[in-house]
Amino acid sequence: MITLYGSLHSRANRCAWMLRELDLDFRHEPTNFQDGSTRKAEFLRLNPNGRVPVLDDDGFVLFESLAINLYLAKKFGGPLGPTDLQEEALMMQWSLWVENEVEKPLLLAAANATLFAPDKRSAEERDVALAKLNRPWTVLDNLLAEQPYLTGDRFTVADLNVASVMTLGPIARIDLTAFANLDAWLMRCLDRPKATDWRSVSFSIPRPPGPLGMLSMFV
Ligand SMILES: N[C@@H](CCC(=O)N[C@@H](CS)C(=O)NCC(=O)O)C(=O)O
């Protein structure tokens, strides 16, 4: 039995998308990260970090959304998973890359565009974050000029992991037209029938107190 913990308005939507792509039956525990549920002792036993998502696969418990997807890809992945060591390495490369190069500035841009309450948004912070994204987005755009997907010719967990982080782009109404290959690839991924419906995602997050620097609670 597989159980996925985490509201679909959280990074758990990445793992829900993966589980759906794999046609796996799973129990969904929509643990809400904004109401204190992730701080309860019962949840902290699953993830001492107090964050969602968490996956429980027959008693094997794993946290970190993209690691969960890499695990599912290797165990059940078929064409979404690796066929050899080098493909597996590329899947890890892109998953670590999107976390390190893209997620934080993209979340900061999205927060300052739509997720923070209007009076808590800063255009300056958004611009700084967007400027940081130029380099990784140029890298992706150039790669996708040469091949349709991140590891080659087929959609894999690498695309799913990177695209699921990039769902924040459309939510923040970030214009990707300057990166035409990236834009077309993202829409190809997000239009897949099993993709979580990112268009319906609407939520807000409180701006953390004190100097932002990093969105400690959410990043
Ligand atoms: N790197 C982690 C981040 C997990 C994370 O920050 N989750 C947020 C929700 S999207 C959370 O649980 N925040 C509540 C908290 O930190 O108290 C992952 O990708 O799984």
Image (cartoon, rainbow, N blue to C red):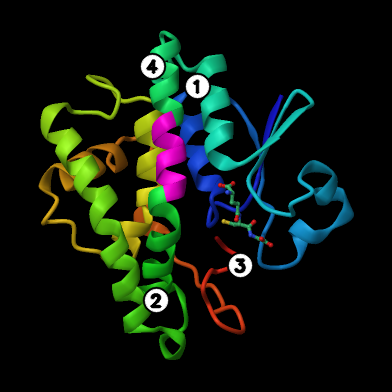
Q: CA distance from mark 3 to mark 2?
A: 15 Å
What percent of the width, then of the height, locates residue 51?
Answer: 68, 53
Of the numbered discs in the image, which one, if any, rests on residue 216? 3
Mark earlier in primary sequence (1, 3): 1
Q: Given this view, does label 3 or label 2 mark the residue nearer the observer?
A: 3
Mark earlier in primary sequence (3, 2): 2
Q: Nearer the viewer, residue 35 or 160?
A: 160
Residue 203 counted in the magenta span = no
* Start-end of magenta stretch: 93-100
Mark earlier in primary sequence (2, 4): 4
What percent of the width, then of the height, locates residue 86?
Answer: 39, 14
Q: Is residue 188 above or below residue 129?
A: above
Badge 3 density bin: few <14, some 14–19, many ≥20, Cα 10 Å: few
Residue found farthest to the bottom = 119
Q: Is residue 94 above or below residue 42?
A: above
Of the numbered discs in the image, which one, if any, rests on residue 73? 1
| Residue beneath the point at 46% across and 83% down | 117
| Residue beneath the point at 37% across and 58% down | 168
